[in-house]
Amino acid sequence: NEKELQYHVAAGKSRRMNSAVSKQFIFISGKPVLAHTIDAFEKSSLIDQIVLVINESDIEKCKKIIINKYRYKKVREIVAGGEERQHSVLNGLKALPSDTNLVAIHDGARFLITPELIDKAVKAAYDSDGVVVAIPVQDTIKESWSNKIISNTFNRDRLWAAQTPQVFPYSIIIEAYSKASKTGFIGTDDASLVENLGYEINLVLGSVENIKITTNFDLILAETILNRRRLK
């Protein structure tokens, strides 16, 4: 039995939200952000087990107010995050069994993810080097080295905004993270580490609702989206 394993990188801090509470523990619509995220993966038909990556100081809190309270069946393990996101992902990868088939890496703060989008990404990864959920960029993107003068304007017809989950064969993603750890390569997302080894990554159309909670405005927007979903 091949295993489809997923884990959240939920070890983010709330620097831009001026909050003393880690953003995965902020309550919205009566539930912590991370609980909403886990709900979607629990409901996914293609996810067998979940490994959570959490700030070490938050692990006991996570067990108490999320894991034990909601009695999730798929959560296999909770591991401590690292100094940066890349270190956290590697810690999570090392916790996975060697016979893992696919790994879906997801930011815990993208709690509006749906089981349908998760399944679509996993299915697309079966016969590929990996897939990234993404949406076409709507705004024109400018580059500036000085933050004042424009140095380049990109053709937005070729630009995509990467989201998560990002799904990869376990053998490829563990190779990519191990190599990056040895060479000091820092990527902006999981796919960039895989691309760095020469693999080809496919795009899967994501959703404008699959936002990452970064600012207080994001919480207001997320609440609106949740309310609209409840009315459907």
Image (cartoon, rainbow, N blue to C red):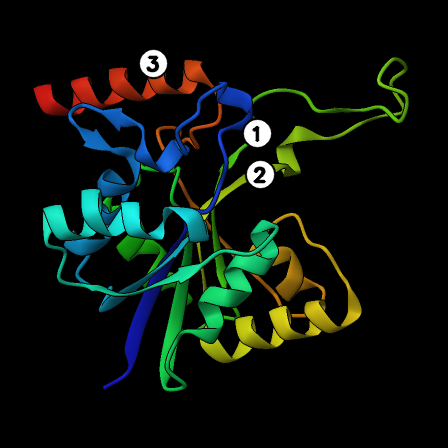
The quarter of the displayed image where residue 36 is located: top left
In the image, taking residue 177 as reference, residue 126 lies left or right, namely left
Task: Find disc 1 in the rendering and name its residue.
Answer: 137
Question: Which secondary structure, mark 2?
Answer: strand
The quarter of the displayed image where residue 76 is located: bottom left
Name the residue at 39% across, 72% down.
102
Label 2–label 1 contact, CB within 8 A: yes
Q: Does residue 83 show up?
A: yes
Please, is residue 48 above or below residue 27 in the view? below
* Residue 47 tag number: none
* Front residue of this view, candidates 78 and 57: 57
Please, is residue 21 above or below residue 139 in the view? below
Task: Find disc 3 in the rendering and name its residue.
Answer: 220
Question: Which secondary structure, mark 3?
Answer: helix
Disc nearest the viewer among 3 and 2: 3
Task: Find disc 2 in the rendering and name its residue.
Answer: 160
Q: Locate the N terminus and report the quarter of the image it occupies.
A: bottom left
Q: Earlier in the sequence, mark 1 or mark 3?
A: 1
